[in-house]
Image: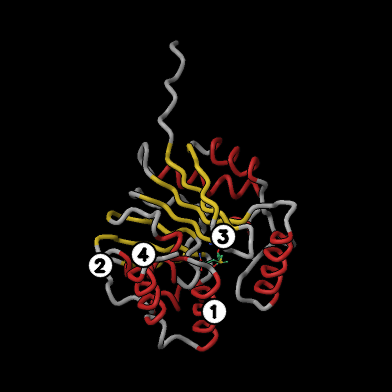
């Protein structure tokens, strides 16, 4: 369970959207209520430059800022409307900013940690791997990549996970861009992280009706090239 200070940080993050359009406010409140972002926040370094890929309206980026004042945060998303809403929630411009960008095509800037929350399932597996490789290129050896995602499993919670995403994409809250979703199995996900250059552990998210997990990845040391 998140501690009182993390819950307070989430409340402060949500409060930043009080002047946002009604639909965006509704979505942000929904994310805060349904997504247990506070559970993920605790794995993110408490200082340094953090890049949140696929930041949406920016709630998680705002939570990172509210949770620790030594974090500098950049959120990137493809959706210009969401970035506009996210920018409306910024009041600490030196420490938090948002940019429109494509996390498949573009490498993020060099940083101390990368986060990716509830994004990868929208992308075909080869694009998911590209995002992870882009993150690896932005990180120094041993630096963390924290990914919240959902796994494909034989589990009633997987049906709930899939159904909820059909609804959010159907209602237009999330732009899918593809005909279907791409939830990897545990083994497929671990293999993808390894190919992208990470060592990874998996943290199950407790008390969730979905197959939510947090992948705690660290950039692996470069393998020495074979002697010529
Ligand atoms: C379900 S939302 C999650 C948003 C946010 N991370 C959160 O936790 O609230 C997925 C986001 O991924 C973004 N996205 C999908 N493909 C993208 C791409 N190629 N580049 C950047 N963002 C992308 C979508 O625009 C959407 O905002």
- Asked if the residue at label 3 sits under 8 Å from ligand 1, the reply is yes
Query: Would residue 156 be found to the left or right of residue 5 on screen?
Result: right
Query: Mark 3: few, some, or many residues within 10 Å (few <14, many ≥20)?
Result: some
For mark 3, give the secondary structure. Answer: loop
Q: Residue 85's x, y, as percent? A: 45, 78
Q: Earlier in the sequence, mark 2 or mark 1?
A: 1
Q: What residue would you read off at disc 2?
A: 94
Tell me where residue 42 sits by quadrant: bottom left
Please report contact status of discs 2 and 1: CB closer than 8 Å, yes or no: no
Q: CA distance from mark 3 to mark 1?
A: 15 Å
Query: Would residue 113 be found to the left or right of residue 102 on screen?
Result: left
For mark 2, give the secondary structure. Answer: loop
Q: Which residue is located at x 55 percent, y 72 percent? A: 34
Whereabouts is ligand 1, in terms of quadrant? bottom right
Q: Which residue is located at x 39 percent, y 78 percent? A: 11
Q: What residue would you read off at disc 4?
A: 64
Q: Which residue is located at x 68 percent, y 54 percent? A: 182
Q: Earlier in the sequence, mark 3 or mark 2?
A: 2
Tell me where residue 164 sits by quadrant: bottom right
For mark 1, give the secondary structure. Answer: helix
Q: What residue would you read off at disc 1?
A: 27
**Residue mark closest to the camera, 3 vs 4:** 4
Query: Mark 4: few, some, or many residues within 10 Å (few <14, many ≥20)?
Result: many
């Amino acid at each position: 369970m998140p501690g009182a200070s993390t819950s307070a940080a989430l409340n402060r993050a949500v409060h930043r959207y009080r002047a946002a359009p009604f639909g965006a406010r509704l979505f942000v409140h929904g994310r805060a209520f349904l997504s247990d972002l506070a559970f993920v926040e605790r794995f993110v370094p408490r200082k340094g430059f953090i890049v949140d890929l696929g930041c949406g309206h920016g709630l998680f980026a705002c939570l990172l800022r509210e949770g620790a004042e030594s974090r500098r945060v950049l959120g990137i998303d493809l959706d210009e409307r969401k970035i506009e809403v996210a920018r409306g929630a910024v009041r600490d411009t030196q420490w938090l900013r948002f940019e429109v960008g494509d996390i498949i095509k573009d490498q993020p800037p060099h940083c101390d940690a990368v986060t990716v929350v509830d994004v990868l399932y929208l992308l075909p597996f080869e694009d998911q791997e590209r995002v992870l490789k882009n993150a690896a290129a932005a990180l120094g050896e041993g630096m963390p990549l924290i990914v919240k995602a959902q796994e494909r499993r034989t589990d009633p919670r997987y049906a709930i996970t899939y159904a909820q995403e059909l609804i959010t994409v159907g209602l237009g809250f999330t732009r899918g861009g593809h005909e279907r979703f791409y939830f990897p199995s545990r083994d497929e996900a671990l293999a993808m992280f390894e190919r992208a250059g990470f060592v990874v552990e998996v943290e199950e998210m407790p008390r969730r009706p979905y197959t939510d997990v947090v992948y705690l990845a660290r950039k692996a040391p470069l393998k020495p090239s074979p002697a010529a």
